[in-house]
Image: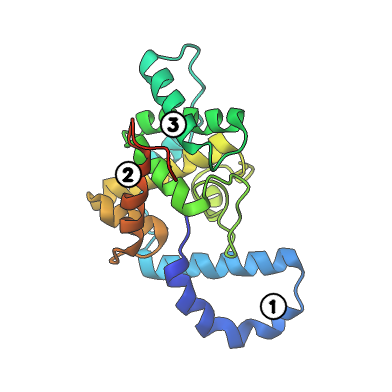
Amino acid sequence: MSPKALLAGVMVLGFVATVPFFLSSTPEEKQRLAQTTAKRMVERNVALLDIRPEEKAELQKMLKPEPAPAQVDYEQLVWTKDIVRTIRPWVGDEKEAEVIARWVYIYSVRFDLDPELILGMIAVESQFDHFAVSNVGAIGLMQVMPFWKDELGQPNDNLLEIETNIRYGCAIIRHYLDRYKRLDRALAAYNGSLGRNKYPNKIFSAMKKFRVNASADI
């Protein structure tokens, strides 16, 4: 998740109070401070962690890993081949592109999501760089905030892993869809900008690149 829109105001307001500590901190402490600020900001503005017990139980269930299927169905094979060709301008290594496409398909099916939605989110969030880390600590392809691991998943999960990151990202957007019932609101919540349309519109625009048989021009 990338709560950049809301973070901007919070970081400015808190800057003067935190400068002395921040300047004397180690890189690890600086990252923890940024993540803590992001977490508190999102809690106040999006009620991100205001999760009912039944929601939490469902999210924990969703965050269990999905084993790769022993046999690949024909529809997945055709879709993956087409998408690998589309995302190669972003992903230099063909094997890595295949891994991304495979897990996007698997978790889109598992969470009843449009795979083009997930690809659009990845394009906007990280431009398909699975090592991406934002200045507020959001990690990986879908820019998942690490506190999701602590609150709902496993603290030792590695969000830089392609499968893990896509699993978390898909579970989170599914959670928001179930809560808000509308894709635009779910996307805004994912981004930390609930009530605003800028981020959802960026995703909707990016999704067009990944429609089956769409142009591979990026």
Please state which of the two labelled residues, at mark 1 or mark 2, is closer to the viewer. 2
Q: Position of residue 183 (x, y in %)?
A: 27, 50
Rendered position, 85 above or below 144: above
Which residue is nearer to you in this view: 187 or 216?
Answer: 216
Which residue is nearer to you in this view: 198 or 1?
Answer: 198
Left or right of residue 48, residue 89 in this image: right
Q: Residue at 62% x, 42% y: name it.
A: 158
From mark 2 to mark 3, how far is it between C-alphas?
12 Å
Q: Residue at 42% x, 37% y: name it.
A: 216
Left or right of residue 82, residue 149 in this image: right
Q: Residues within 10 Å of mark 2 (few under 14, many from 20)?
A: some
Q: Position of residue 15 (x, y in %)?
A: 58, 83
Question: Closer to the N terminus: mark 1 or mark 2?
Answer: 1
Q: Which residue in the protein does label 1 denote?
A: 22
Q: How is the image coloured?
A: rainbow
Residue type pointed to by label 1: Phe
Q: Which residue in the protein does label 2 denote?
A: 208
From mark 1 to mark 2, how far is it between C-alphas?
42 Å
Q: Is disc 3 in contact with disc 1, using a CB cutoff of under 8 Å?
A: no
Residue 91 in sight in this render = yes
Q: Residue at 57% x, 48% y: name it.
A: 140
Residue type pointed to by label 2: Lys
Q: Secondary structure at mark 3?
A: helix
Q: Is disc 1 in contact with disc 2, using a CB cutoff of under 8 Å?
A: no
Q: Secondary structure at mark 2?
A: helix
Rendered position, 127 above or below 57: below
Q: Which residue in the protein does label 3 denote?
A: 83
Left or right of residue 141, residue 216 in this image: left
Which residue is nearer to you in this view: 12 or 53?
Answer: 12
Left or right of residue 214, residue 5 in this image: right
**Farthest bottom residue in view:** 16
